[in-house]
Image (cartoon, rainbow, N blue to C red):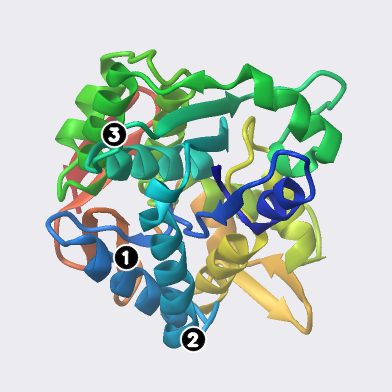
């Protein structure tokens, strides 16, 4: 049996269960960095590994090794009678899930069964943030509730993965508006993804706005900023490494920074307060920027897709 899940924490717990088999951690943070269309799987792994290195998360060699090992474990699927996918409801997991399902849709599965465990709550665990909260016995209790992956789920995952990697957001917007229910948590997750696009009012992604709001309440270290920003999410999708990267961006931007660092602590600057008051713009005011959202590349002087929270839509502009 091949178990595929969102991270090493859950994979380790799965290895301690009586279920047996091999547990694979998907290990990618798809809501951060480039996930461009039109590149084969091995090249995408190299792109992702270079991105991990650029943030200081790991070396290129180590990052690529981890992704290649994951890919090799997946390619060994014919050795297993069943593949069980373990994912939760948040953006982090839903992006991984559509990538996994899209990959599986291209394989010759023959008699290999594919099952899905995809939950947004667990009795007695409140608040429920994810599978990482569950112990061995609790994970084992979910196993009998797994359901075969359907043709419709594969088709939706293929459509969503293509939309996520598209160089423009048109397909993504159309998918969110179509209210797909074959994967019950996908639409809400993708709506949250749209909120990570720069806001029309101030150029801030929702996650960066949360971090500035937390900093505006008093001097805090980066762990405290992360936890307070995390608590502003209905479904927690961002781990601390992603938050720390955003904190660094806010503190190190030129010509003005939105956060001021004093030793291990951070406070919001006057410019940061102006951003929160929608009196400045995080993109227009910066000397330069380049970043990716899925398959969309944002650069200074180019077209920037912005989130209009009032009208719930993306608009193009500078």
The quarter of the picture where the C terminus appears is bottom left
Q: Secondary structure at mark 2?
A: loop
The residue drawn where x is 35% and y is 31% is: 111
Rounded to the nearest angstrom, the CA distance separating label 2 from label 3 is 38 Å
Whether residue 186 is visible, yes or no, is yes
Q: CA distance from mark 3 to mark 1?
A: 40 Å
User: Which residue in the protein does label 1 denote?
Assistant: 291
Q: Secondary structure at mark 1?
A: strand
Q: Nearer the viewer, mark 3 or mark 1?
A: 3
Front residue of 44/224: it is 44
Mark toward the start of the polypeptide (1 vs 2): 2
Q: Position of residue 317 (x, y in %)?
A: 18, 47
Q: Work out whether 65 lies above or below 138.
A: below
- Does residue 84 sit above or below 211 in this rendering? above
Foreground residue among 197 and 163: 163
Which comes before the other along the chain, label 3 or label 1?
A: 3
Q: Would you name the residue on which mark 2 appears?
A: 59
Point out the tag, 2 or 3, that comes first from the N-terminus: 2
Residue in the image at 24% along x and 40% along y: 108
Where is residue 146? Give x, y as percent: 58, 22
- Residue for badge 3: 110
Mark 1–mark 2 distance (CA, rounded to whole Å): 20 Å
């Amino acid at each position: 049996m091949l178990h595929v899940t969102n991270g090493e924490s859950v994979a380790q717990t799965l290895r301690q269960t009586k279920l047996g088999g091999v547990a694979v951690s998907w290990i990618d943070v798809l809501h951060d960095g480039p996930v461009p269309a039109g590149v084969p799987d091995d090249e995408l792994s190299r792109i992702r590994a270079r991105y991990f290195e650029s943030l200081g998360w790991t070396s290129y060699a180590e990052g690529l090794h981890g992704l290649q090992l994951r890919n090799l474990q997946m390619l060994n699927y014919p050795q297993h009678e069943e593949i069980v996918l373990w994912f939760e409801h948040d953006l982090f997991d839903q992006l991984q899930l559509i990538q996994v399902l899209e990959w599986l849709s291209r394989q010759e599965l023959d008699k290999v069964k594919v099952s899905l465990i995809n939950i947004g709550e667990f009795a007695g665990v409140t608040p429920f943030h994810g599978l990482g909260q569950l112990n061995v016995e609790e994970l084992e209790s979910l196993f009998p509730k797994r359901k075969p992956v359907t043709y419709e789920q594969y088709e939706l995952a293929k459509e969503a993965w293509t939309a996520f990697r598209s160089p423009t957001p048109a397909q993504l917007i159309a998918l969110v508006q179509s209210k797909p229910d074959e994967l019950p948590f996908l639409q809400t997750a993708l709506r949250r993804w749209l909120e990570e696009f720069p806001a029309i009012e101030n150029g801030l992604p929702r996650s960066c706005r949360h971090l500035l709001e937390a900093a505006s309440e008093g001097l805090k270290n980066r762990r405290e900023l992360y936890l307070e920003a995390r608590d502003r999410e209905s479904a927690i999708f961002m781990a601390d490494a992603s938050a720390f990267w955003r904190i660094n961006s806010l503190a190190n931007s030129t010509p003005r920074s939105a956060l001021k660092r004093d030793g291990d602590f951070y406070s919001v600057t006057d410019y940061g307060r102006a951003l929160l008051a929608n009196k400045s713009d995080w993109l227009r005011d910066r000397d330069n920027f380049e970043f990716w959202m899925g398959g969309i590349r944002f650069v200074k002087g180019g077209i920037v897709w912005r989130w209009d929270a009032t009208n719930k839509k993306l608009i193009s502009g500078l």
